[in-house]
Image: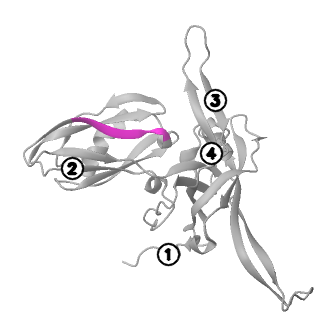
Amino acid sequence: MSIGSLYNTKGVVVGQAAGFYAPENTPLPADVAVAFDEATWLSTTVAVTGTPTGGTAQLLLSGGPISGIITANIPYNATASGVKAVLDPLLPAGVVSVVNGGPGPGTAWVIAFVGSAAGQIIVAKGTNALTGGSTPNTTVTSPLWTPAGATEQGWQNNYNPQTQDINIEEQQTSVGRKVTTATFDFTANLSEDTVASLKLALGAARTVQASDSTHFAVEELSLQQDLPVLAVALETANKYGMPRRYYIPGATCAVNVGQQFARARVQRLVPVTFSSVCNVEDIRIREITGPPTP
């Protein structure tokens, strides 16, 4: 599976590296054991609560190419493969579900999607017809991480230390120098030119106006002076073919904004820089060097 295949809605292969953002200080998901797994970042947890002894529940799928679809009834004790069998016939071409967890009450199904439009699909609660137990229900926890985009060129990083001269008895010539603050910047040309990627790059608020008999449909971005602080995770492959993961718990993104045309008519690139605003000691670079030992 190519890194970044999920983040190109027009199906252009991007490969090489992918980025994600979330609210400030959001922890990383579990480490990928064997290879890059885009579903790890975008999984939704559906927990069965109240220890039901029978009945069914439904889920609501929406977003992107799905206008709003209620699934068939899912038994309270469905296996992961059973939930997958309910979801896949409802998904658009090129998208498949990845389901883990279950069966039985008190457990959870972990659902994610892989494919060209997977990052746009949202899972929500549908009809609850669970029986037995104590007020049985389902709770849905949406993924915290959002795709920032992918790049064919990988991530470029730049470490910027700020220094201060050390003087003794007010000498004009410093006798030493120490680093007082530092920032870490990560820059990439994200594919592709969409309102979502420009919104991220510009730190902009987004409004949408639907079309009617006298108006075009319009998506409008308005720049913000007070930029949001984000947690940023960037992933690429290392020499072992495993993920290398950069994690910045606090960063802003409103630097080096531009637009470039690529050779392919349907693919454009948005230059973006994530600049750290956290203590540099909190930034982590993690190499996964091999799968778990059996």
Furthest toward the right, the residue is: 172
- Sequence-wise first label, 2 or 3: 2
Secondary structure beneath disc 4?
helix
Left or right, 25 with reference to 131: right
Q: Nearer the viewer, mark 1 or mark 3?
A: 3
In the rendered image, the vertical position of residue 170 relative to residue 250, given as above or below = below
SS at badge 2: strand
Q: CA distance from mark 1 to mark 2?
A: 34 Å
Q: Which residue is mark 2?
A: 48
Query: Label 1: which residue?
Result: 290
User: Most prominent secondary structure in the magenta stretch?
Assistant: strand
How far is mark 2 from mark 3, CA to CA? 39 Å
* Residue 188 image-quadrant placement: bottom right
The residue pinned by badge 3 equals: 220
Give, as a three-letter code, the residue at label 3: Glu
Q: Which residue is mark 4?
A: 200
Q: Please tell me how crowded label 4 is: few (under 14), some (14-19), or many (20+) other residues with Cα within 10 Å.
A: some
Residue lying at 11% horizontally and 48% vertically, measured from the top left: 52
Element type where label 1 sits in the image:
loop
